[in-house]
Amino acid sequence: MSTSKAVGSGSELVRSRRRDFLAQASAIGAAAMLGLNRPARAEAPTETTKVRLVTAPNICTAPVRLAEDLLRLEGFAEVEYVGLQTHTGPELVAAGEADFTQWDVAGMIPMLDAAAPILILTGVHAGCQELFANDRIRTVKDLKGKRIAVSAMGNGDHIFISSILAYVGIDPVKEVTWITGSELTGATKLFTAGQADAFMAFEPEPQDLRRQKIGHAIVSMVEDKPWSQYFCCTVAGNRDFVRANPIATKRVLRAILKATDICANDPERAARYIVDKGYEKRYEVALATVKLLPYRRWRDANPEDTLRFHALRLREVGMVKTDPNKLIAQGTDWRFLNELKKELKA
């Protein structure tokens, strides 16, 4: 009986080693395809070999998806992607159901205001959103008194639009009518059905709307200042995970930022990888999105400026109570980003 148990244990050990070998081989193959090599420097092992990341349907989150095999090269034997279901990425991270998320900064600000246990760690890119309106609306100021569709009150689209409205002198609490969708794509459906005058379109929605000749953009966060100067997407981690696992946190960010560089430097290869992995079926749509977004932004811009800009606008209209400087002090940690900017300078 003991012999049988020993044989079984040995067989399981062989199977386990084979799984690890295959995962490593797959990661090395993907890294080779993406033109990356294993980090040559000797480093301390990670505190944990498992990491959970939120996966969202938007193509702009390509860096998190491309990072999967790079994370294995960083020493993570288990890389788990957590679906959204009825929660946002920051909500999943705050609840401890995921460790990291790439998410729009606007959706994180109310959670930081409520002292949720998340830390923003880096900016990723700008410009993945466009404020679309019907043909009766020509400028943002024309939205006063109009109907605006959002996925949910407090979600990123609601907060971003509120900040834009406040910037031009419209009170987002009193001077517009908010209509909520029942799902992440609900705002799009409300707008295309004519039940709303405007909504925030996330890539690749603007491509599809232009193809169908529905509405037009009144704000492009790639082209229009001041919005184009700030991040739309950032990476946040669970506060307890980050503090307990600083080595693992740095390696997660390194994998994501390397993947961000792939999007910036070789969008064709990144788009093909996205399609091959099944994240988006249409290569031309994936390529157009990756080419559009300024993925080099993480190297040059200060994500703290983005947080302060939006938090000030929202505080002016009573949607944020915390002083922006306090919000930044309590809800961010730039140590890893500062180290990686130097390390990945080449």
Image (spheres, grey):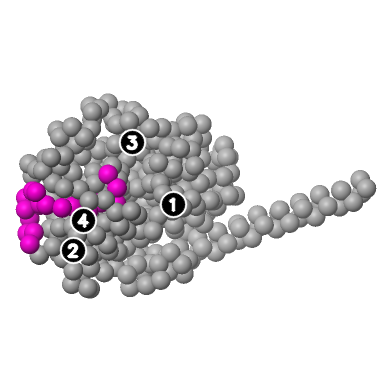
Query: In the image, is 7 to the left or to the right of 36?
Result: right
Q: Which of marks 3 and 1 is in front?
A: 1
Circle 4 crowding by C-alpha within 10 Å: few under 14, some 14–19, many from 20: many
Q: Nearer the viewer, mark 4 or mark 3?
A: 4
Circle 3 crowding by C-alpha within 10 Å: few under 14, some 14–19, many from 20: some
Numbered circle sitting on residue 194: 2
What amino acid does circle 2 point to?
Gly
Inspect this view and state whether residue 333 appears. no
Residue 211 falls within the magenta-colored stretch: no
* Residue 297, percent from left and from top: 27, 50
Query: Label 3: which residue?
Result: 111
What amino acid does circle 3 point to?
Met
Of the residues under marks 3 and 1, which one precedes in the sequence? Answer: 1
Of the residues under marks 1 and 4, which one precedes in the sequence? Answer: 1
Dot 3 falls on a residue whose secondary structure is helix
What amino acid does circle 4 point to?
Phe
Q: Nearer the viewer, mark 4 or mark 2?
A: 2
Dot 4 falls on a residue whose secondary structure is strand
Numbered circle sitting on residue 287: none
State which quadrant residue 295 falls in. bottom left
Magenta residues (range) = 136-153
Rendered residue at 22%/65% (across/down): 193
CA–CA distance between discs 4 and 2? 11 Å
CA–CA distance between discs 1 and 2? 26 Å
Q: Which of 102 and 21 is in front in this view?
A: 102
* Vertical placement of residue 111 versus 21, above or below: above
Query: Label 1: which residue?
Result: 85
Numbered circle sitting on residue 199: 4
